[in-house]
Image: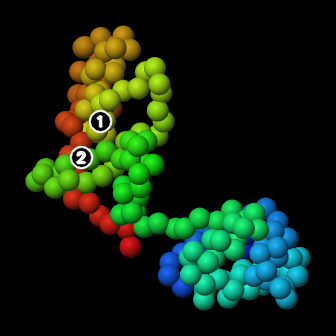
Amino acid sequence: FTGPSALDRFYRVRDGWLRVQTPHADELRATGLLPHVDSAAPDAELARALADALVSRSLVEALECLNGAGVCAVAVRAPHELPLDPILRELDVFATHHLQDGTPYLSPHRYACFSRTQSQATFEPPGLGEHSRQVLSEAGVDAARIQALLDAGVLKEGGPFRLVAIQTYR
């Protein structure tokens, strides 16, 4: 899926990919990339014309052209490039975890930073039922009722989440 429309999609360039997002086709015409295409043309025609105009350009050339005309466009980065980004590092976006065999892997860490209440803990996802007793107990459910729910199979109890392998996508 490259995007929902010609104005909001990924495009291949000579040395990579870029993401374009603009509300109006007229902004694309201002780039000079679509000199013979009517901005009211059907979406498929706009997408094809823009793809043809971009595929032979370098990423730098395409970004300069698009951004110079006020079109929002950015380079597409591969997942392995993101942890190397100095801004993402400064924002503490990724956390290092370890598989059972000690192999390190990255996962999302911080979605937001709070100046007065920032936690420094690296959170791990809970295992299925890991905190069942604790949560119900803190909610005021007595121990006998919790045990009855466990015995009836209504409630599950388990240990910590253990990631044993990472499946890459594509």
**Quadrant that contains the N terminus:** bottom right
The residue under the point 43% across, 49% down is 88
Residue denoted by label 2: 97
Q: Nearer the viewer, residue 6 or 125?
A: 6
Q: Secondary structure at mark 1?
A: loop
Residue type at mark 1: give it. Answer: Thr
Q: CA distance from mark 1 to mark 2?
A: 9 Å
> Is residue 21 visible in the rendered structure shown here?
no
Q: Quadrant of residue 129?
A: top left
**Other-residue count near label 1 (Cα within 10 Å), few / some / many at <14 / 14–19 / ≥20:** few
Count the marks.
2
Q: Position of residue 13 (x, y in %)?
A: 57, 81
What is the x, y in percent for residue 136? 34, 19
Which residue lies at the image location 46% right of the left edge and 20% below the top edge?
Answer: 116
Q: Residue at x 72, y 67 (%)?
A: 68
The x and y percentages for residue 6 are 72, 74
For the residue pair 17 and 146, the one nearer the viewer reads as 17
Q: How is the image coloured?
A: rainbow
Quadrant of the image for the C terminus?
bottom left
- Residue type of the residue flagged with mark 2: His
Tell me: residue 108, above or below residue 22: above
- The answer to whether 38 appears left or right of 53 in the picture is right
Sequence-wise, the earlier of marks 1 and 2 is: 2
* Circle 2 SS class: strand
* Nearest to the observer: residue 158 or residue 155: 158
Q: Is residue 96 visible?
A: yes
Q: Residues within 10 Å of mark 2 (few under 14, many from 20)?
A: some
Is mark 1 in CB contact (under 8 Å) with mark 2?
yes
Q: Pick the residue in front: 16 or 32.
A: 32
Which residue is tagged 1? Answer: 122
The answer to which image quadrant residue 126 occupies is top left
